[in-house]
Amino acid sequence: MEIIRKINWKKLGLVIKPNRTKFWEAKYCMLPTPLKLNNSGSFRIFYSTRNKNNQSIITFTDIDIKKKIKIRRQSELPSLQPGQLGCFDDNGVTPSCVIKIKNKIYLYYVGWKPRCTTRYSLVSGLAISKNGGKTFTRYSKAPILKNTDREPLSILTAPWVLKIKKKWMMWYVSGEVWLHSDLPRYNIKFAYSNNGLDWHQTGKVCIKIKKNERAIARPYVFYQNKKFHMIYSYETYKEKYRLGYARSNDGINWKRMDNLFNLKNSKNKWDSQMVEYGTLINFKKKTFLLYNGNNYGLKGIGIAEYINE
């Protein structure tokens, strides 16, 4: 799917819901993060659920979109649990991007940690799987993005990574300022790497916050027809998250074109107040959007089909 004009979506409802029969999955399916399993329309969708202590845990559900959208299987165990006490991810983990590198799966994730003066710390980590994403082992107990003089706040989160030939590129959410202890302001910045493990943070802002906006969140980037395309979430001081779109020739300098992304809120449904954290899955000539709704995915993950009109 190439976005060149306003696109329309047909909402198909919730595709993945919290499995409340599992002790570690009490509520939420947050940040849908897809991994293509084969060429027959099967995808593994990672997301974070929350346990009874409200801590995020990463799990997955496999879906099939070949003919009719259906669930193939749900994970019986968590893929990644909170980290060691005192580490950057000791209060929760949330997936953001998965990449298949030969026989390994790289999971770039968000580590949650409560703070005493601000609401939270959100910093990016990396875990690696050798069994197709069923379980992951941390590459390091430390985060892969670091605080610097340019980026002193502990909001370095929601990374999306592309590997194009030998070039690794990352777009991530970077904290700009805390307006007060519960309300941060953040945008999207750019980093690059030679190996996907060690990252150089350029400090370059890719998607700038507009005057009336509070946040630009969770980038999803794909490369098509020699251009970079980004779907992201944006929030104003008056309205909750919506999905936006931007385009770039080099992946660093972007032009916002939010008016092209035509996904509206439903009336009196699970996505009546928010639509956010969008990612795409493709099979043959069909494109589907996975996204969260009200309260950051409390009810689950929705799906919408691209309508080429």
Image (cartoon, rainbow, N blue to C red):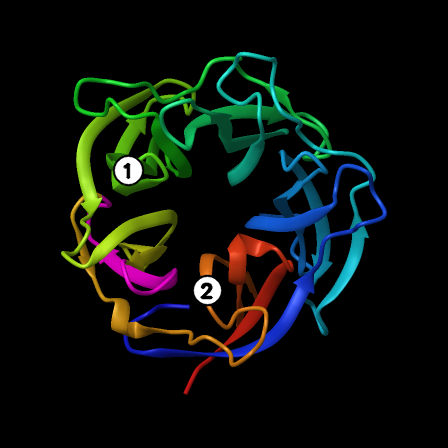
Q: Which mark is residue 275?
A: 2
The residue drawn where x is 19% and y is 30% is 203
Q: Position of residue 81 (x, y in %)?
A: 67, 27
Relative to 42, say whether 190 is above or below. Answer: above
Span highlighted in magenta in the image: 237-251
Does the magenta run of residues contain 123?
Answer: no
Q: Would residue 166 be seen by someone viewing this image from the given angle? A: no
The answer to whether the residues at label 1 and label 2 have Cβ atoms under 8 Å apart is no
The circle on residue 180 is 1
Figure check: 276 above or below 133: below
Relative to 105, say whether 32 is above or below. Answer: below
* Residue 160: percent from left, percent from top: 41, 40
Using the image as rendered, state which of residue 73 and residue 233 is in the foreground.
Answer: 233
Label 2 amino acid? Answer: Val
Decide which of tag 1 and tag 2 comes sooner along the chain: 1
Disc 2, SS: loop
Identify the residue at image location x=52%, y=81%: 267
At horizontal 27% and vertical 67% (from top left) the residue drawn is: 258
Q: Quadrant of residue 105?
A: top right
